[in-house]
Each structure stands twice: as structure tokens, then as C-alpha cells.
Amino acid sequence: MKALSDEIPLFQAIFLRGVGAVIFLVIMCRMLGQLRFRYPPRDWGLLILRAVGELGGTFFFLTALFNMPIANVSAILQVLPLSVSLAAALILGGALGWRRLTAIFVGCVGVLLIIQPGGADFSSYSIYALGAVTCATVRDIATRRMSAEVPSVFVALIAAIGVMMLGAVGSLFTPWQPFTATSAGQLAGATTFMIFAYIASASAMRFGEIGFVAPFRYTSLLVALILGVLSLDEWPNT
């Protein structure tokens, strides 16, 4: 998506990526016998809340990503393990011992060292990344509160529909651009990774202990640093 931003407007990319994800997930739900809509109102409320969190997170994250180095955006998103773990402890009564809380706090301090608020590399788009953290926290807590009878693939489908609708509305107000072979391949790759990320993140947050699962998000910072150097020629400072 970062490489695609040079050619394709944000909302056009979100909409077309969403279309691909929705088609794939509908087929997957149908094959698994999970394309059912008779769930309690409480679960539907949580599904809608999760979808709102997902589309808000998508907008804020991609806006920041299109305007900042990928490693900087990923660094700010590392506040998410702390926010999700604390929200789970406060709202869901999740286990969060002093050792785990200390480890998460140390990771958060490391993130602040990377962000350097007020420094020369700090961007106003950093606020968008923090908005993505807030939305993702709402998404993850809503996911956790769903009953086990709602399949993870169906959860991912509802989120994909919400994000697709966001792209559809936004793309009405921005001029569309033609695709090249390169940009089409980039969009296809982004769509594929997003589909499996939807399913994996929903499954992890629903069935894993949040205080244990959340810190694994720190690994994305290392991945983003490597990809930024290899693919985008974005070198981190010392």
C-alpha cells in the first residue's frame, strides 16, 4: 500500500482492496458453511462496533502511511500493545501482572525514543497514527467480547465490508487514476495479505489471552524497518 500511494489515491485503493477482500471472504465463508446471519443482537452490535473500529483504523493508518516512512508509522502503532492490554484489564478484567505490565511499558518507552516527539523527524501525521491506535483498541476489545459462536472468517467479512464502504464513499470525491501492471500487482498483494491478516488478528484476539497476544505486535516494527530499507529505501536514523 505504501508503494502504491505514488500512483493510486487513498480511497480508490481502499475501495478496490476491499472489493477483493469481500469477494474472497464471502467465498470462504460459503465453503466453510459460515455465511450465517442469525446471531444475537449483542453480537451484531459488537460486529458493527468492530467494523467501525476497523474502518477508522484503516483510514488513520493508511493516511499516515501514505505521508510518513513505514517504520515511523509502525513505531507509533507499537503503543497498541499497551493500550489493548490496559483496556482489556480495565474493561474485561484480563490478567495483567506486574512483570507483563513492566515489559509492555519498557516497549512503550522504546517507542517514544523512536518517535521523538518535538524532534525534527516528528510529523503531524503522527497524530493520524495515534488515531489508528485508538480505533484498533476499540476493534480488539469488541472482538474479544463476541460469543464463540460467531466464526472468525465471518467477523473478518463484516470488517472488510465496512472498510470497502469507507473506500466507496471516499472515492466518490476523489478523481480515479488508471492502473499500471506494477500498481495492479501491488494492490493484489496488499489485498491478499490483508485477507489473512483479518482472519489471523480476529482469531488471535478472540481465543488468545490478550495480555499475552498483544506484545507480539512489537514484531511488526522489526518487519517494517527491514521492508522500509529493502523496498522503499527508507533508512532509519541512529
Image (spheres, rainbow, N blue to C red):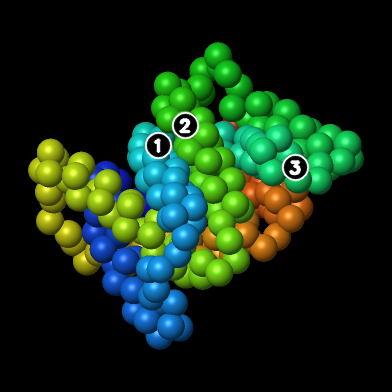
Q: Are marks 3 and 2 in contact (CB under 8 Å)?
A: no
Q: Is residue 49 above or below residue 39?
A: above
Name the quadrant containing residue 206.
bottom right
Q: Residue at x 84, y 35 (%)?
A: 102
Mark before the other along the chain sequence, 1 or 2:
1
The residue that mark 3 highlights is 93
Q: Is residue 153 above or below residue 117?
A: below
Q: Amino acid at mark 2?
A: Gly
Depth check: 212 or 39 in front?
A: 39
The residue that mark 1 highlights is 60
Q: Are marks 3 and 1 in contact (CB under 8 Å)?
A: no
Mark before the other along the chain sequence, 3 or 2:
3
Q: Is residue 165 above or below residue 157?
A: above
Mark before the other along the chain sequence, 3 or 1:
1
Q: Residue at x 64, y 49 (%)?
A: 217
The residue that mark 2 highlights is 131
Q: Judge from the rendering whether residue 216 lies leftward or rightward of residue 225; answer left or right.
A: right
